[in-house]
Image (spheres, helix red, strand yellow):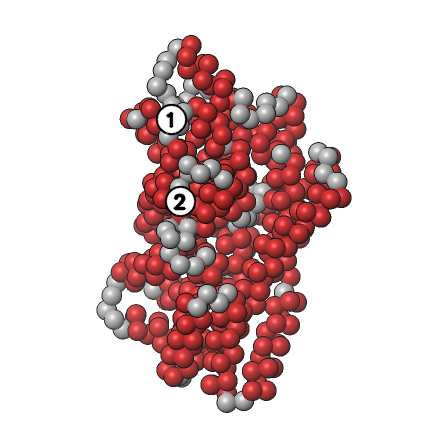
Amino acid sequence: MFDSTTATVLVIVMGILIALGVHIAVALGIASAIGIYLITDNFHVVQAMVASTATEALRDFNFAVIPLFMLMGEFILRTRAIEDIYVAINRGLKRIPGRLAVATVLGNAVFSFVTGVSIASAAAFSRIAYPPMKAMGYHRNFALGAVAGSSCLGMLIPPSVLMIVWGILTEQSVGQLFLAGVLPGLLLTLFFILYIFAVALIWPQTVGEKRRGAATEVSDEIALSEVEIRPLRTVLVSFIMITALVTSALGGIWAGYFTPTEGAGAGAAIALIFAFVRGMRGKELMEAILSVGRTAAPILLLLLSAALYSRVLAMSGLTNAVQGLFLESGLSPFAILMIMLGVWFVLGMVIDSISIMLLTVPIFAPLAITLGYDPIGFAIMGILAIEAGLLTPPFGLLVYTVKATIRDKDVTLGGIFWGSTPYWIVMLALFFLIAQFPVIATWLPSLTF
């Protein structure tokens, strides 16, 4: 039975708290507690539901997947293996137009397989990739756009934190979602590279190709001097290290040897060993753990609040009411999908991706299944749309991350937003492609038994 009063109060309270700048986890928790009280008219029930929800959440091993995969990425980042691979890709693409930007995209794709957080990718490649592109004469906005835009791959290529959160919220298999993200992630990588090729061929000055012959070779060496050149043996070890990590952790999950939690734990342990081999010691270990804790703790708190929020939605009947409203509107499934996309884009302008997911997925996911969309295909479309919010002004978390990491007074937020807009458009194009051909996301998961 739909309780319109409770639903209205829930929406108004949450909207006011978010507008006042209250953290989304706190806003969700307060609004949910008020909603439970309005439905039950009993404060003891509110206490009991908050306590039981928190207990169930803390006992759920799926929650451990997030910090463990983040720890794996943090350890690998401190081995500097990603820098080795980036330099190797640079060397291997010597005759490719716009190769520094292409190397940035490919490097981000590789890094995405060992970290589930786009922010980590943006921060790392702002330091690794931007200096050589700047030295090579790349247009500033184009270079920064390549860094910010390609960092979005970290939310689509497994182990993505957004996929883990989506799986927890919808009770879908995290391993299946990981598989579903592989082909779209690689396709998105290809589309980014094709865009860079097009720019390099049509406007070569954008990628610093103002001169030819010996002069080009000289500028090329200047650019490479911005990045420390590693011996071939070091690069090979880094490549083997990353390959072994992805094969053991993600491969073990996909083959059924590990649960996602066990795979994340194994990956973190292997990455820790590699980090110690590469020279990481006690102080750096503590810094890595604290860094992950500062990022993961708010996410886990958000998930706890979201679990309570989902219960209130079910109790108030809001989810069913929204479904009924859309289903009785006479709109086509595609038109309703466009409304969802619009909501995601508007929310992306003001709040972060995980918060958007927590607010909308409990309502949108059941509706999409009712409309006939494949739950896995819809998950990838949703992650793509929400991921694009990382590049959407005025919030644009990845853009702010790049700006804060570079610390160059000549770099402006507007310039980074402008440079990353084509990547936003490409992600939107892939969204529609998957909507038309969901097999892109569902094919790999369908091969598992």
Mark 2: few, some, or many residues within 10 Å (few <14, many ≥20)? some
Contact between labelled residues 2 and 1, with CB atoms less than 8 Å apart: no
Label disc, if present, on residue 262 of the rendered structure: none
**Mark-to-mark CA distance, 1 and 2:** 20 Å
Question: Could you tell whether 24 is left or right of 327 in the image?
Answer: right
Under circle 1, the secondary element is: loop
Residue 33 visible in the displayed image: yes
Which amino acid, by three-letter code, is at mark 2?
A: Leu
Say which label, 1 or 2, has the lower sequence index.
1
**Which residue is depicted at the point 61% across and 59% down?**
297
Q: In this rendering, which labeled residue sits more in front, label 1 or label 2? A: 2
Residue sitting at the far left:
330
> Where residue 425 sits in the image (x, y, percent)?
33, 44
Residue sitting at the far front:
409
Count the marks. 2
Which amino acid, by three-letter code, is at mark 1?
A: Val
> Where residue 103 sits in the image (x, y, percent)?
47, 30
**Which residue is depicted at the point 53% across and 35% down?**
127
Label disc, if present, on residue 413 of the rendered structure: 2
Under circle 2, the secondary element is: helix
Residue named by callout 1: 207
> Where residue 63 sits in the image (x, y, percent)?
61, 60
Residue sitting at the far bottom:
41
Is 87 situated above or below 406?
above
> Where residue 239 sits in the image (x, y, percent)?
61, 31
